[in-house]
């Protein structure tokens, strides 16, 4: 299993090289990329900010949960921070497992849980010069 929060550019290869086994018949890859529009507005880029220490811990938890679902420890997830242009990847996920259903399920689980739980915030930069923080989910805090 591999997880990271990084300011470096990410590609499918970033996560693909960290999964796979001779017994795996499936590799599922998901890339989340910056699009050029949102809710009727033209977007020129986004900025991602993170509570890094918490984000690293939560991302590892999500990957471990996905690995359990897939019955495979071959899960790799990387989320980017900083300024990203249209077309750049903000998140890359790869899961390999003996069968496709588990790989697809685990990959989808990771992205859905990231959207719900990861303490990473997104600010869109619009073509007209305006900027806006996007609404997100408040991460759950464990109380000891």
Image: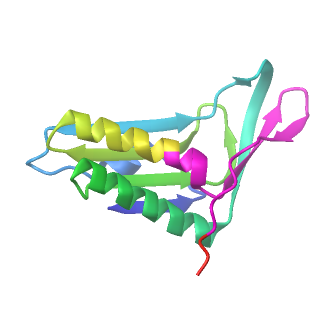
78 or 108, which is in the foreground?
Answer: 108
Q: Going 14% across and 51% down the picture, which residue do you hit?
A: 21
76 or 98, which is in the foreground?
Answer: 98
Q: Residue furthest top?
A: 40
Residue 102 lies left or right of residue 43; in this view the side is left
- The N terminus appears in which quarter of the rendering? bottom left
| Res. 120 in view | yes
Q: Position of residue 50 (x, y in %)?
A: 67, 60
As displayed, is residue 80 above or below residue 142?
Answer: above
Q: Residue furthest front?
A: 144
Magenta-drawn segment: 113-141
- The C terminus appears in which quarter of the rendering? bottom right
Q: Going 79% across and 18% down the picture, which residue do you hit?
A: 40
Picture quadrant of residue 64 = bottom left
Q: Is residue 62 magenta?
A: no
Q: Going 37% across and 50% down the picture, which residue do you hit?
A: 15
Residue 67 lies left or right of residue 83; in this view the side is left
Q: Position of residue 27 (x, y in %)?
A: 25, 39
Q: Position of residue 22 (x, y in %)?
A: 9, 49
As displayed, is residue 33 above or below residue 7?
Answer: above
């Amino acid at each position: 299993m591999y997880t990271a929060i990084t300011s470096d550019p990410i590609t499918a290869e970033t996560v693909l090289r960290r999964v796979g086994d001779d017994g795996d018949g499936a590799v599922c890859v998901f890339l989340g990329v910056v699009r050029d529009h949102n809710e009727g507005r033209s977007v020129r880029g986004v900025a991602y900010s993170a509570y890094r220490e918490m984000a690293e811990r939560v991302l590892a938890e999500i990957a471990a949960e996905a690995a359990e679902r897939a019955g495979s420890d071959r899960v790799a997830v990387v989320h980017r921070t900083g300024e990203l242009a249209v077309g750049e990847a903000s998140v890359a996920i790869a899961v390999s497992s003996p069968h496709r259903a588990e790989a697809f399920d685990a990959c989808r689980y990771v992205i859905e849980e990231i959207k719900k739980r990861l303490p990473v915030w997104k600010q869109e930069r619009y073509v007209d010069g305006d900027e806006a923080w996007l609404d997100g989910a408040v991460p759950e805090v464990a109380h000891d």
